[in-house]
Amino acid sequence: MQIRKAKGNDAPAIVEIILPIIREGATYALDPDMSEADALSYWMAPDKETFVAEEDGVILGTYYMRPNLAGGGQHVCNCGYMTRASATGRGVARSMCEHSLVHARTRGYRAMQFNFVISTNERAVRLWQSLGFELVGRLPEAFRHPAHGYVDALVMYRLL
Amino acid sequence: MQIRKAKGNDAPAIVEIILPIIREGATYALDPDMSEADALSYWMAPDKETFVAEEDGVILGTYYMRPNLAGGGQHVCNCGYMTRASATGRGVARSMCEHSLVHARTRGYRAMQFNFVISTNERAVRLWQSLGFELVGRLPEAFRHPAHGYVDALVMYRLL
């Protein structure tokens, strides 16, 4: 699996990956009904670096990195990761996160923050913890899950 | 003191209040060098409701309210409050926060979240705690303070 910067012609594959996850509305606090164009604009926004994980010419996952805040907060980055549904369980998210930790250091970031990990996304929580992220905050009932109703969201963080 | 929706002709007073605070760079994670126009666009952005606290025709403070996130996170609001330097210590921020808690309930929000309270801003931390906010997260060294270097930032939250 190769992880590289996303190019313009990766857009269709990126949409294939991110749109079902946005539509499901269970793991990201984004409008589930947002248009395909808006979803792509969000994921490949000018303030983000966007990457893809590719194997045998197939894009299996994608992630972005951006400064989490401006001014005195710009040394902390934020990332979002999404894996193609058919490729789950193959370590794609882990590989992307490992890649992002290396890339963040080369970019001079001093920490990485996940602002809003849905507590029901236990697989993600365990994965981030195994990669050195600490659960530094719990937001009671901050996310309305399409199946489970109001559930907690977590703030996860690690110094680099 | 009257707290009301900001109008277009409040813009000069709002700029007088927010620009010195942004320039100081000690309490908000915003670019300290942002232009006056960008500062105003940020504070009065389309996704925000902006209020002013007025006494005897003088604007003493201003705050905004917005959904903190979209989709499954849109029932949590976020606010930012700024008080005119010459009016500190007169309860302006407290009055604005109390107003915002009432307004948030009328808007149907279920919680209010402060994403990034600088730990050195002890006066604010105590004030928010006295208004029912809990310190739900601590982000180690997440803010570079112009005087104190890297300091922690706090996530504060209360259900409504």
Image (cartoon, coloured by chain):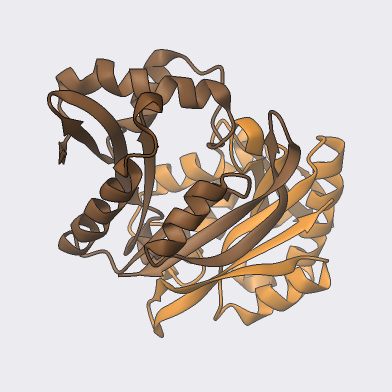
Chain colours: A brown, B orange
> Image point 21% across, 64% down: which residue?
A105
Instruction: Name which quarter of the figure residue A9 lies in.
Output: top left
> Image point 46% across, 14% down: which residue?
A35
Q: Is residue A42 left or right of residue B47?
A: left
> Image point 41% across, 42% down: which residue?
B37
Instruction: Name which quarter of the figure residue A150 lies in.
Output: top right
Please determine whether, in this image, residue B39 is positioned above or below residue B134.
above
Q: As drawn, which residue projects farthest toward the bottom? A: B148
Q: Position of residue B76 (x, y in %)?
A: 70, 44
User: A130 or B84: which is nearer to us?
Assistant: A130
Please determine whether, in this image, residue B70 is positioned above or below residue A12.
below
Instruction: Answer whether residue B104 is visible to the viewer in this image.
Output: yes
Q: Position of residue A88 (x, y in %)?
A: 39, 34
Q: As drawn, which residue projects farthest toward the front? A: A89
Q: Is residue B97 left or right of residue A32?
A: right
Instruction: Answer whether residue B29 is visible to the viewer in this image.
Output: no
Please determine whether, in this image, residue B157 is positioned above or below residue A159.
above
User: B142 or B30: which is nearer to us?
Assistant: B142
User: B60 or A92: which is nearer to us?
Assistant: A92
Please determine whether, in this image, residue B99 is positioned above or below residue B72.
below
Q: Quadrant of the C terminus of chain A?
A: bottom left
Q: Position of residue A61 (x, y in %)?
A: 30, 33
